[in-house]
Image: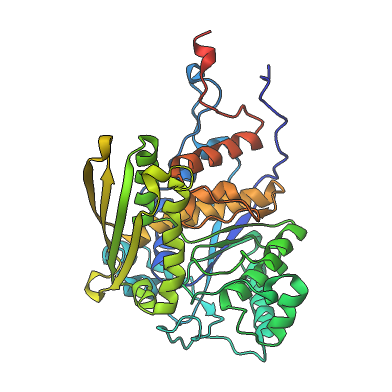
């Protein structure tokens, strides 16, 4: 018997056939993701960190003991149905790129050599003006940016046909572009397309990929902090074409820690004088972020988190005018093994000062790979469920979550997870979980 809070389930198409996962960038994140999925398919590894593969979801009351795996509850594409494609500015296949990235042990990469060698990157849309520390040779040429978008659309259709895919999703896993702000070129699709034909510098390569994806009926997820699909022209195009989009900037290392710890400080009403964060990393991401203009894009993404979680305007005694400083240092010997230091100056009862210090020795691509998997599967689910436009329920995965215009983003990791799971419950017509719990004591 349905309860008062239950609704009619959303009509979701079954995930029949192959799902093509198109990755922009075949570097450390993408190769770690592809190799991981292939290893899991072979049964030689576990999908640690993936909500779609290992997460559960409570249904009904706590006393009902209904806690299925998410992948058993909601119709997601299976790992055996995934097909991988990519664009990159270097010609290396996924095997060579994985060896070069140095994230995974060579023995594991060698075991997966045939599968990885099969993923050969298509020529990328690239302009060094937007990522100044890289210089690729495997790049497309075109008279203007619209022509480049059309070449990407041809790639998408060819990939779908050759690999016999029924559906596609695209995930940006490439480098951080220089800082851009939305302008008149981004206001509507007419202005956007004119800007593309005129080779306007306002149209970054990531926007060309997003445009090509949406014109090809492919959902798009942005894993970097670039201004990309979060401009009015492209978000409206997504809505008009019935396509889900989400972003931005994968939430992995230091910011993941912030979205865990800051909600705890706020919950206990512990004050904050300052939060100093510094990172060292030596992968391609670190090299790109060594450029001040690319770092500005990342800094904007990382700095916004604490303001939104702590709400200084609501809690001025605790959080007004706290210092928040973020530094990223390129240190080649560290490779993909990023180290993030945080010094947190807090104060408690009667204003007495205290400190928290964190030294997070993380592996950036190891934390990002399961995010790519979850986004690919959830974005495909969203499209099959008829969900279009910004998918705020996927904020859980991002440093700078996209939202409706004028709506502030929710950064608290635990609220984000509740929102994600309640969205899945809503889709299946299950009762939403509010944690009120009065019914246990009536």
The image position of residue 202, as x and y in percent, is 61, 80
Q: In the rendered image, is residue 389 in sight?
A: yes
Residue sticking out furthest to the bottom: 143
Closest to the observer, 37 or 341: 341
> How many numbered marks have been drawn onto this rendered protein structure?
0
> Residue 241 lies in what quarter of the image?
bottom right
> Residue 35 lies in what quarter of the image?
bottom left
Q: Relative to residue 242, is residue 172 depicted above or below?
A: below
Residue sticking out furthest to the top: 442
Q: In the rendered image, is residue 81 in sight?
A: no
Closest to the observer, 140 or 118: 140
**Is residue 383 shown left or right of residue 260?**
right
Q: Relative to residue 31, is residue 351 depicted above or below?
A: above
Q: Residue at x 37, y 43 (%)?
A: 318
Q: Which quadrant holds the N terminus? A: top right
Q: How is the model colour-coded?
A: rainbow
The image position of residue 372, as x and y in percent, is 48, 57
Q: Residue at x 70, y 33 (%)?
A: 9
Q: Residue at x 72, y 85 (%)?
A: 197
The image position of residue 224, as x and y in percent, is 48, 66
Closest to the observer, 271 or 254: 271
**Is residue 243 shown left or right of residue 292?**
right
The image position of residue 146, as x and y in percent, is 69, 82
Q: Residue at x 59, y 69 (%)?
A: 228
């Amino acid at each position: 018997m349905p309860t008062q809070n239950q609704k009619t389930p959303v009509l979701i198409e079954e995930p029949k056939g192959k799902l093509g996962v198109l990755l922009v960038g075949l570097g450390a994140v993408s190769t770690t993701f592809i190799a991981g999925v292939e290893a899991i398919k072979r049964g030689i590894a576990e999908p640690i960190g993936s909500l779609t593969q290992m997460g559960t979801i409570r249904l009904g009351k706590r006393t009902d003991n209904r806690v299925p795996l998410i992948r058993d509850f909601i119709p997601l594409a299976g790992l055996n149905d995934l097909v991988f494609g990519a664009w990159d500015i270097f010609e290396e296949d996924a095997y060579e790129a994985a060896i070069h990235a140095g994230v995974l042990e060579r023995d594991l990469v060698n075991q997966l050599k045939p599968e990885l060698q099969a993923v050969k990157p298509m020529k990328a849309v690239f302009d060094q003006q937007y990522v100044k520390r890289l210089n690729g040779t495997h790049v497309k040429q075109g008279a203007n940016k619209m022509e480049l978008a059309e070449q990407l659309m041809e790639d998408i259709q060819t990939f779908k046909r050759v690999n016999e895919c029924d559906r596609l999703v695209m995930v940006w896993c490439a480098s951080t572009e220089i800082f851009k702000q939305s302008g008149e070129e981004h206001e509507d699709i007419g202005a956007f397309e004119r800007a593309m034909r005129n080779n306007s510098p306002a149209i970054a390569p990531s926007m060309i990929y997003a445009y090509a994806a949406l014109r090809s009926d492919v959902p798009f997820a942005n894993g970097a902090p670039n201004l990309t699909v979060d401009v009015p022209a492209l978000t409206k195009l997504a809505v008009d074409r019935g396509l889900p989009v989400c972003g931005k900037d994968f939430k992995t290392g230091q910011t993941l820690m912030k979205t865990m710890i800051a909600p705890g400080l706020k919950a206990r009403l512990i004050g904050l004088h300052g939060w100093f964060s510094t990172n060292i990393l030596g992968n391609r991401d670190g090299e790109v972020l060594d450029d001040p203009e690319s770092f500005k894009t990342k800094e904007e993404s990382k700095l916004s988190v604490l303001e939104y979680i702590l709400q200084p305007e609501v809690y001025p005694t605790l959080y007004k005018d706290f210092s928040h400083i973020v530094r990223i240092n390129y240190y080649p010997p560290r490779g993909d093994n990023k180290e993030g230091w945080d010094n947190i100056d807090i104060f408690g009862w009667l204003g007495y000062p205290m400190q928290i210090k964190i030294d997070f020795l993380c592996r950036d691509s190891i934390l990002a790979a399961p995010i790519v998997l979850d986004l690919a599967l959830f974005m495909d689910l969203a499209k099959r469920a008829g969900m279009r436009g910004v998918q705020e329920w996927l904020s859980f995965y991002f440093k700078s979550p996209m939202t409706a215009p004028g709506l502030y983003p929710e950064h608290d990791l635990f609220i984000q997870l509740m929102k994600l799971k309640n969205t899945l419950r809503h889709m299946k017509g299950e009762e939403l979980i509010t944690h009120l719990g009065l019914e246990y004591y009536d």
